[in-house]
Amino acid sequence: MELIFPLLILVLLVPLFLGSRRQKKALAAAKDLQQSLKIGDNVMTSAGLHAVVAGLQDTTVDLEIAEGVITRWERVVVREVVLDEVLEDEAPEIEAIDDQSVDGAFNDATSADIERFQK
């Protein structure tokens, strides 16, 4: 009966200790990644924005999100360096939508449909 209390404390403290070690490793890896950035790297931010590193300062990074469009971000938002695995030839083709098919969809609406949506 005397061993139950120390075992209970041990069972609660071991996962806490292991979780903190895992978190420290993740923070160290993120810091190493942010310090190893180079101009020209393709990166993804924590918000999911894909961009190319255009400039580096002590605590900030300039990201080119489109040709000629450069924004300044804190380095901590860079989550990972993205490798260029998809070549332009292999990129999926996107079918263009012509204006006539969209206009035709609106022309098919009856006056009853229009009245119902205006209410």
Image: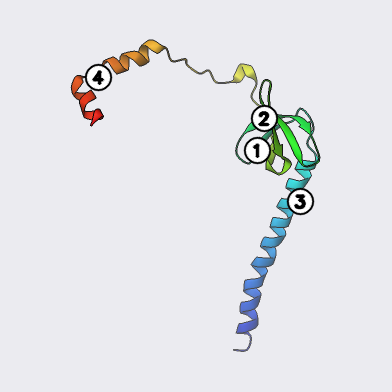
| Labels 2 and 1: the sequence-earlier one | 1
In the picture of the structure, the residue carrying the numbered disc 2 is: 51
> Dot 1, how many residues are within 10 Å of its Cα: few (below 14), some (14-19), or many (20+)?
some
Query: What is the CA distance from the residue labelled 4 to the residue labelled 1?
Result: 43 Å
Q: Which of 48 and 72 lies nearest the eye of the viewer? A: 72
Please name the amino acid that badge 2 sits on: Ala
Left or right of 32? Residue 9 is left
The circle on residue 28 is 3
The amino acid sitting under disc 4 is Ala
Horizontally, residue 110 falls left or right of residue 81, namely left
Lower sequence index among marks 4 and 3 = 3
Asked where in the image residue 80 lies, by quadrant, the reply is: top right
Q: Mark 1 = which residue?
A: 45
Which circle, 3 or 1, is nearer the viewer? 1
Using the image as rendered, state which of residue 10 and residue 36 is in the foreground: 36
Please name the amino acid that badge 1 sits on.
Thr
**How busy is the neighbourhood of tag 2: few (under 14 within 10 Å), some, or many (20 plus)?**
many
Which badge, 2 or 3, comes first in the chain's sequence?
3
On screen, residue 55 above or below 3:
above
Please, what secondary structure does the residue beneath circle 4 have?
A: loop
Kindly state the secondary structure of the residue where label 3 is placed.
helix
Residue 92: percent from the left, percent from the top? 55, 21
Residue denoted by label 4: 109
